[in-house]
Amino acid sequence: MHGYIRFSCSPGRDARRSRSRIYWSSAQSIDDFLPAKSPTTILSSTLPYLMERLPLEVLQPIFGLACVDGGQTGSALSLASRFIRQASHPYRFNAIALSLLLPVYEPTNRVRAFLATYQKYSQPTYGSRPRIRHLYLAFTLDPITGTMVMDYHSLSCSACALFQEVAQDLVSLAIHIAPNDVVQLSWFLRLLDAPLPSLRELTVLNVLDPTLLLFNTDEDDTELEPLFPAVERLHIIQLRNVFSGAESLGLADWMTHAPRTTHLRVSNLQHYSDGFAVQLTSALGVPSEWQQLRTASHPLTNDRLRHPHLRCIVLQLCAPPPDHYEGPVGNAYMTYRRGLVNLSAYPAEGDLGIMLLTPPRNRSTAAWADNAKVAWMKRIGGRAGCWDVVEGTREEIQALREEGVYL
């Protein structure tokens, strides 16, 4: 059985007489004569148009959950279509990761360039103002041109201007100042000139003293406002270089500028940071003899008046030196490790937990930086991130136990 299609050039009488008929088998259709398309091609070509039929109340929460990879998804959504660009505009800069290779000069200052772009898209002509809720900043020194003199003041001014723009919206922040044996960047980079009132989670690499982040330190330290008044989770990663002996990790300074910290984690804790252990012991009301002797004859003290907000402390000592079983360096390392083990075993109050993790196996500075960024992205994506040792799922904690993470 056959069918046919009639083509007519014009509706006139002559045209009706010159009708043409094209016959085809009834088992075929017009789609059989068209180029074949894979399901992926069809979906990718029609997805923007299907999404445009959804209301903004449904689309925008999806965009907020998707834009958590450092800025790539937000940039890709702005290129999908005009409707998707406008709908995803409030979440385009939801999570931003910036990495700078120093020395930085004014034409290549990525902080200033990004700030100019962000200010451009924050104008009312683009609709609602996009908000930066998660920020990752990394500063590394070029091993070839790192010895060249650079304008740290200009870079610090750009960073301060950026934080002024995002101070009210920023929820999580990670700052990585890579260590090197040429110059200690944390002594010259001043990134903040005002508190971050909305910040809840903070991760710092190679920043042992929060006052070093202040742009203006002319005021007395006792008159300074806390830089992170609302931070609840603080992760400090200590990285070692030739300047490490000139710095000390002080608990008092961090608790002053993050007075509401409930979860504290210190990773790669160097064994020469004995001041931190002493301050932690004193802050928790642990008798000094307990850390050395671990005797149960000392009664439980309730002297947590200075930092009663702490609920969880996670400590991870640095990798042991090659001669950690002998020699003065090895003896100092083992003594410090025994002190931390005794401190974690102290029967403190029920609302406080002290956890000691196994030292890493010769983890490099680059590995610490990569792991910190991955943990930051997992955290803003709704997962436990660096707090998986405390808040991970049952399967994750079991996997960590099998890996020997817990000491």
Image (cartoon, helix red, strand yellow):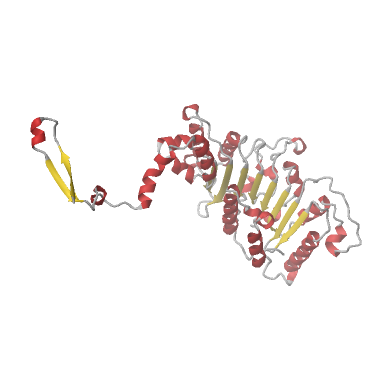
Residue 288's place in the image compared with 191, above or below, is below
Q: Quadrant of residue 318?
A: bottom right
Q: What residue sits 46% from the left and 37% below the top?
A: 54
Quarter of the image with the C terminus in it: bottom right
Q: What residue sits 13% from the left and 43% below the top?
A: 21
**Where is residue 230 drawn, in percent x and y?**
70, 40
The residue lying toward the viewer, choosing from 152 and 365, is 365
Q: Is residue 8 left or right of residue 81?
A: left
Which residue ends up furthest to the top in the rendered image? 124
The residue lying toward the viewer, choosing from 16 and 284, is 16
**Where is residue 294 drawn, in percent x and y?**
85, 64
Q: How many marks?
A: 0
Residue 403's place in the image compared with 91, above or below, is below
| Residue 371 shows up from this direction | yes
The residue lying toward the viewer, choosing from 322 and 92, is 92
Q: Is residue 56 left or right of residue 243?
A: left
**Where is residue 404 drawn, in percent x and y?**
67, 66
Q: Is residue 406 left or right of residue 76?
A: right
**Where is residue 82 drawn, in percent x and y?**
41, 35
Q: What residue sits 48% from the left and 32% below the top?
A: 120
| Residue 102 shows up from this direction | no
Which residue ends up furthest to the bottom in the rendered image? 326
